[in-house]
Structures are given as C-alpha cells and as structure tokens.
C-alpha cells in the first residue's frame, strides 16, 4: 500500500453515503494500492458511518458550519456553497502528497491507480461544455496554501454554476489550453448522459470505460431495483434507455454484492 496517496470522496447525507459505499467497494474491487478516505458531514447517520468504516481507511467529519476557521467565515458570505466548501476541505488532507477526488455518484470498473501519475489539476472534459473540466473525478495535491486561496477565491468571485465545478474551473482556469496531460480521457469520467449525447461513440468506446459517473439530479440509489428481474423502476414510470439500465445494473450489482451485506 502506498500510504501517501489516497482516493477521496464526500458524502453529506445518507443518500450520498450509499453512493460512497458503492464507489469505495468498487475501488477495493479494482485492487487499488492507495488509501481510501471519505469526508462526511455530521448529518450522516451512525448506521451509515459504521458501514463506511468497513470500506474506507479514514473517515473525516467536516463540519463547515461549526468550525471556527476561515471556511466558516467564508460560508457566512456565500451560504449557497455549503457542500462545495466541504469538498474544498480535500485540500486540507496534507498527510497525503497526491490524491484523486471522486464524486460519490461515480463507480470504478477497472483499476485507475495510474491516475496518480498525473499532476494537479487533471480532470476529464465536461460533457455539457468540454472547455470546462468535470469536477466529479480530478487529481490534486493537498496544500493548505491552495486551500486558503480557494476559499478566498470563492468569497471574492463565487461560483458561476453555484457549485464546486464552476469554482474549480474558474480557479484552475488554464486547464482547457495549457497542458494536454491534465486532460484525462473521457473514459475516466464517463457520464451517463453520453448515452444520449453521442450514442454511436458510447456503443463504440463505452466498453472501455474505467469510471462511470451518474451525473444529474437522479442518482442510482433513487431508483427501485428488482434483483430477480433486473428491472429498474423510476417514479415517473417512463422507460429508460437500455444502455442507461445497463449502467444502473453495474451500480446495483456492486450494491447487492458488497454494500448490502454491510447492513445485515
Ligand atoms: N454531495 C454531497 N451532498 C450533496 C450534494 C453533493 O455529499 O447534497 C457530494 C457528493 O460526493 C456528490 C458531489 O458532492 O457526488 C457532487 O454532487 P453531484 O454528484 O450531485 O453533482 P453532479 O455530478 O450530478 O453534477
Ligand atoms: Mn457527480
């Protein structure tokens, strides 16, 4: 195990905690040699924390509201950035020299430890606006200096999309043009919307995906999944595109095999 490098994720609720449990289990399944760290908010229940402790090496409770540090002060000026500020806390993990942040709604299909060969800030293009990177998967170097500069930046300029992605793209603003090595292949952050955006490419390259990202308001844990029939039920009752169902199936496979046993 390489003890100075870590995968980092974030969950501020039990719902995202379910996502994080699947992500963490999928990283274990990929035989990663790196440490698994999760940042949680005090809102996450004891039940979910106990399960998280089986999967993650380190659980760090971040309470931006209660802290008396600069993050709290910054939040007073920008209350809408609560979750974002918790994500920025990743830069405080200075016992690690390099980390890969992954959203709790991502799923690892193959070993991605080679991401640690990349430099800050490496990320894949966003499918909606490819001159911006998607902040669901990125390589970074923890640093208190960078952390404070990010907080100051957030207070001064806010986030053009109200979340961490807008903020990080404004802060690391030369990502689009400066260094192609900082552009991760789309396969390292394949968002499920690509199925709709470019189905032919999805059919051609989708099987090479390393990370699936269930971007958007409806997350895998919001569906009802029936294991026997592999049927995914949505609340609208609208049929889902079959490729999306296949991706949801991958998520639920990990949930049933690795996460559910943690709760019984
Ligand atoms: N997140 C969280 N609680 C929230 C919203 C977001 O913990 O209420 C974390 C979680 O890790 C999530 C990430 O922030 O994956 C980014 O949010 P989300 O994935 O919902 O955004 P999207 O990828 O859909 O744009
Ligand atoms: Mn996400």
Image (tube, rainbow, N blue to C red):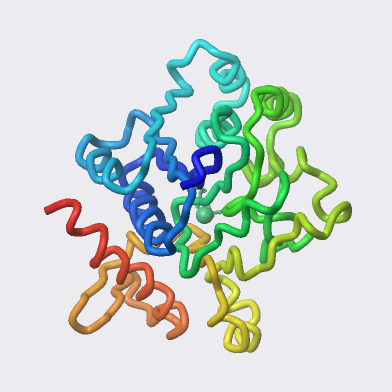
Query: With 50 as the anchor, is 8 left or right in this view?
Result: right
Q: Position of residue 43 (x, y in %)?
A: 32, 32
Say if residue 80 shows up in the picture.
Answer: no
Indicate whether 163 appears above or below 196.
above
Q: Foreground residue, 38 or 99?
A: 99
Say if residue 31 shows up in the picture.
Answer: yes
Indicate whether 30 appears above or below 136.
below
Q: Position of residue 35 (x, y in %)?
A: 45, 44
Q: Foreground residue, 38 or 15?
A: 38
Q: Foreground residue, 194 or 217?
A: 194
Query: With 7 as the anchor, is 45 left or right in this view?
Result: left
The number of numbered badges drawn on the structure is 0
Query: With 80 as the anchor, is 219 left or right in this view?
Result: left
Q: Position of residue 199 (x, y in %)?
A: 60, 85
Task: Name the residue: 42% across, 61% down.
Answer: 31
Q: Position of residue 110 (x, y in %)?
A: 49, 69
Q: Quadrant of residue 76?
A: top right
Query: With 46 as the anchor, is 58 left or right in this view?
Result: right
Task: Name the residue: 60% across, 74% down.
Answer: 194
Q: Residue furthest front?
A: 1
Q: Residue furthest left?
A: 264
Q: Foreground residue, 35 or 207?
A: 35
Q: Residue furthest top?
A: 68
Task: Name the residue: 61% across, 59% down.
Answer: 114
Task: Name the residue: 40% across, 38% down.
Answer: 12
Q: Quadrant of residue 234?
A: bottom left
């Amino acid at each position: 195990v390489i003890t100075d490098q870590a995968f980092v994720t974030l969950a501020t609720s039990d719902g995202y905690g379910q996502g994080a449990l699947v992500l963490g289990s999928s990283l274990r399944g990929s035989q990663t040699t790196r440490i698994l760290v999760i940042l949680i908010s005090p809102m996450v229940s004891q039940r979910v924390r106990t399960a998280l402790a089986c999967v993650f090496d380190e659980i760090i409770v971040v309470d931006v509201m209660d802290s008396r540090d600069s993050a709290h002060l910054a939040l007073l000026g920008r209350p809408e950035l609560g979750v974002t500020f918790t994500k920025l806390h990743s830069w405080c993990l200075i016992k690690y020299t390099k980390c890969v942040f992954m959203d709790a709604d991502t799923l690892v299909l193959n070993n991605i430890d080679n991401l640690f060969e990349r430099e800050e800030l490496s990320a894949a293009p966003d499918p909606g606006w490819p001159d911006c990177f998607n902040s669901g998967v990125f390589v970074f170097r923890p640093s208190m200096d960078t952390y404070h500069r990010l907080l100051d930046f957030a207070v001064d300029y806010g986030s053009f999309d109200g979340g961490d992605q807008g903020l990080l793209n404004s802060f690391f603003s030369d990502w689009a043009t400066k260094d192609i090595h900082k552009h991760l292949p789309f396969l390292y952050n394949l968002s499920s919307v690509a199925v709709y955006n470019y189905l032919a490419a999805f059919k051609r390259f989708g099987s090479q995906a390393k990370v699936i990202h269930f971007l958007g308001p409806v997350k895998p844990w919001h569906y009802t999944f029936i294991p026997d029939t592999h049927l995914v039920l949505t609340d609208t009752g609208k049929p889902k595109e079959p490729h999306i169902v296949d991706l949801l199936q991958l998520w639920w496979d990990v949930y049933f095999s690795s996460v559910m046993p943690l709760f019984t």
